[in-house]
Image (cartoon, grey):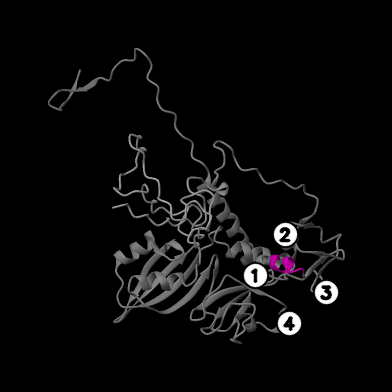
Amino acid sequence: MPKRASKPRKNTPIGGKGPKAGGKPKRPGRGSKTAGAKTAGPKKGAPKKAGAKATGKPGGSKPSGSKPSGSKFSGGKPSGSKAPYARKPAAGKRPAAQKQHPDDGKDRLQKVLAAAGIASRRECEQLILEGRVMVDDQPITELGVRVDPSKQEIWVDGEPLKKTKKVYFAVNKPEGYVCTARDPSGRPRVTELLPPQMGRVFNVGRLDMASEGLILLTNDGELANQLAHPRHGVQKTYLVQVAGHITAEELKTARDGIYIAEGKVHFVGAKIKSRHKKSTLLEVVLDEGRNREIRRVLAAMGHKVQKLTRVAHGPIKLGEMPAGAYRPLTREEVKALRQCVVDSEAAQEGKLAPKKKRKPAVKKPGAKKSASATNKAGRRVIE
């Protein structure tokens, strides 16, 4: 019997040019040579291609199941090649050093705005990016502009920048207050505890709504940014009442550090102040304050925080101030805060300073052996 003609195979490309993967193959026309023609099998005596498997059917081997390059399985990247953005910097090259500006009386615009009490440094950067700041009748929308406030006119939201007297306050934040400049929900804000005639101030760092205790308010944006930034590591002390009896081993784990969503966190200091029938009072010290850090660390150990009070921020103590009350800081206290920042910066520089590597000892030729040796039994003998 004559062999039955096989059907033409689907025009699915393995790679290179051709119709898109998954597209409908074109139907051969009447004049096409492939219509109704037999598929050519391998010739007798012809050498087989390396790696090809014999199928036992005419028409050659089937196309492999590999996907074409650029498909959704490969993420749209060509196979076998690295993306140009994955290049690494050449070995031995150091990043370019930042340009040092001369002492010409100019400073960065956001720093000038923060020092004038407009807002914190980050909020001032946002004001600049939004085009709400003008210098000499020119709108500024980029960061990095340096200005001299004594010689140039600076406007914010259509109002000239005025040099205001810097103020510093310690406030005992009650539970239920939020530490934000604006609150769409209309909740009470900690800045509302000061009388309006004190002018615009903002808080140094934050305490969550359920926490209470010491928080600093000021219009000195530069100092506020330094005190709140985790790089400076200004320590803050808390009294924490937790449910249940916490053990010394658990406190050691908290000091060593545990992992939360943002990474590894740890308590700089943690000790038991007193024990009660169903709770434990702790003293916890942090050098950075992530969102609800104390509550999350203790919750990971199975202890719920019942009450959290900040009692110290650097050298400033809460003392016997009642909830909702405030007091101005003395000159000595402000000076101590600035010195605290200087000391923390010096400590950080000491930690980051590269350690000198010791050169390996080079044995000189003909050097005498040591007076002690070891025999076969492993005992040390003196020659």
Q: Name the front one of labels 2 and 1.
A: 2
Q: Give the CA distance from mark 4 to mark 2.
A: 32 Å
Sequence-wise, the earlier of marks 4 and 2 is 2
- The amino acid marked with disc number 2 is Leu
User: Label 3 neighbourhood size at 10 Å, few (<14), some (14-19), many (20+)?
Assistant: few
State left or right for residue 186 relative to residue 59.
Answer: right
Most common SS among magenta residues: helix
Range drawn in magenta: 125-131
Q: Can you say which quadrant of the picture contains the C terminus?
A: top left
Q: Give the CA distance from mark 3 to mark 4.
A: 22 Å
Q: Nearer the viewer, residue 351 or 281?
A: 351
Q: Please, is residue 196 above or below residue 81 in the view?
A: below
User: Label 1 neighbourhood size at 10 Å, few (<14), some (14-19), many (20+)?
Assistant: few
Which residue position holds label 4?
197
Q: Secondary structure at mark 4?
A: helix
Q: Please, is residue 361 above or below residue 202 in the view?
A: above
**Residue 252 sits in which quadrant?**
bottom left
User: Label 4 neighbourhood size at 10 Å, few (<14), some (14-19), many (20+)?
Assistant: few
In this view, the residue farthest toward the left is 377
Residue at 71 percent of width and 77 percent of height: 200
- The amino acid marked with disc number 1 is Thr
Q: Nearer the viewer, residue 296 or 114?
A: 296
User: Are the residues tagged 1 and 3 within 8 Å (C-beta)?
Assistant: no
Q: Name the front one of labels 4 and 2.
A: 2
Sequence-wise, the earlier of marks 2 and 1 is 2
Which residue position holds label 2?
143
Q: Give the CA distance from mark 3 to mark 2.
A: 19 Å
User: Label 2 neighbourhood size at 10 Å, few (<14), some (14-19), many (20+)?
Assistant: some
Mark identifier at residue 330 = 1
Sequence-wise, the earlier of marks 4 and 1 is 4
Which residue position holds label 3?
158
Q: Residue 332: where, in percent of width, then height?
A: 63, 65
